[in-house]
Structures are given as structure tokens and as C-alpha cells.
Image (cartoon, rainbow, N blue to C red):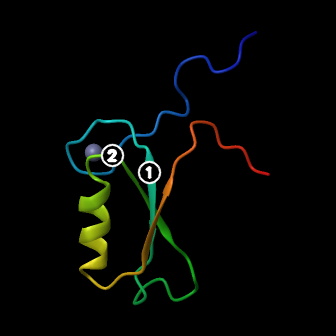
């Protein structure tokens, strides 16, 4: 038995029409609807990171980006 058959961890860019693998997580919230501290996470490839964060920040939403790890490894 091997680990990682297929690509269960494949994560695709959230930009419409983009099929590139995501390398950044864009964590944001809409203060009007996320009043309990919840956040949303979009995924972005290198090309669209700026687009997605700009889209959100232009609406006044708090947004932060972080690098995606290929394998989530919580400490
Ligand atoms: Zn993309």
C-alpha cells in the first residue's frame, strides 16, 4: 500500500478559468457577513495572487496571503 495515490491534495487556483495549481492561500473575510470571526480561503497560483488580493482589498475586506505547503504539516 502506498501513500498519495492520485492527487488528493491537488489544489487549483480560485481565479475563474484558471487551472494552475495554487501556491498561495488567500485568507479573507467580509466584515458585513462574517461577524463571528469566520474567514474564507481562496487559493491562488503565482500569477493570480495579486489579482485576488487586490480584488478583495479594493472592497475593503481584510485579506492576508500565505504560502501553501505541498503537504500540510501542523506543528
Ligand atoms: Zn491562477
Depth check: 36 or 59 in front?
A: 59
Report the quarter where the N terminus lies: top right
The x and y percentages for residue 31 are: 43, 88
Q: Quadrant of ligand 1?
A: top left
Q: Is residue 52 left or right of residue 11?
A: left
- Please give the name of the residue rendered at 60% of the width and 16% of the height, measured from the top-left corner: 5
- Please give the name of the residue rendered at 36% of the width and 81% of the height, measured from the top-left corner: 61
Residue 42 placement: quadrant: bottom left
Is label 2's Cβ within 8 Å of ligand 1?
A: yes
Circle 2 sits in a helix, a strand or a loop, which is it?
loop
Residue 60 placement: quadrant: bottom left
Q: Residues within 10 Å of mark 1 (few under 14, many from 20)?
A: many
The x and y percentages for residue 72 are: 65, 43
Q: Which mark is residue 46?
A: 2
Residue at the top extreme, as displayed: 1
- Please give the name of the residue rendered at 30% of the width and 73% of the height, measured from the top-left corner: 56
Q: Which residue is mark 1?
A: 24
Amino acid at each position: 500500500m502506498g501513500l498519495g495515490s492520485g492527487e488528493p491534495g491537488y489544489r487549483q487556483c480560485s481565479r475563474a478559468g484558471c487551472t494552475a495549481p495554487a501556491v498561495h492561500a488567500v485568507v479573507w473575510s467580509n466584515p458585513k457577513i462574517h461577524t463571528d470571526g469566520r474567514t474564507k480561503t481562496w487559493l491562488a497560483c503565482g500569477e493570480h495572487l495579486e489579482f485576488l488580493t487586490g480584488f478583495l482589498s479594493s472592497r475593503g475586506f481584510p485579506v492576508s496571503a500565505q504560502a501553501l505547503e505541498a503537504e500540510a504539516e501542523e506543528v
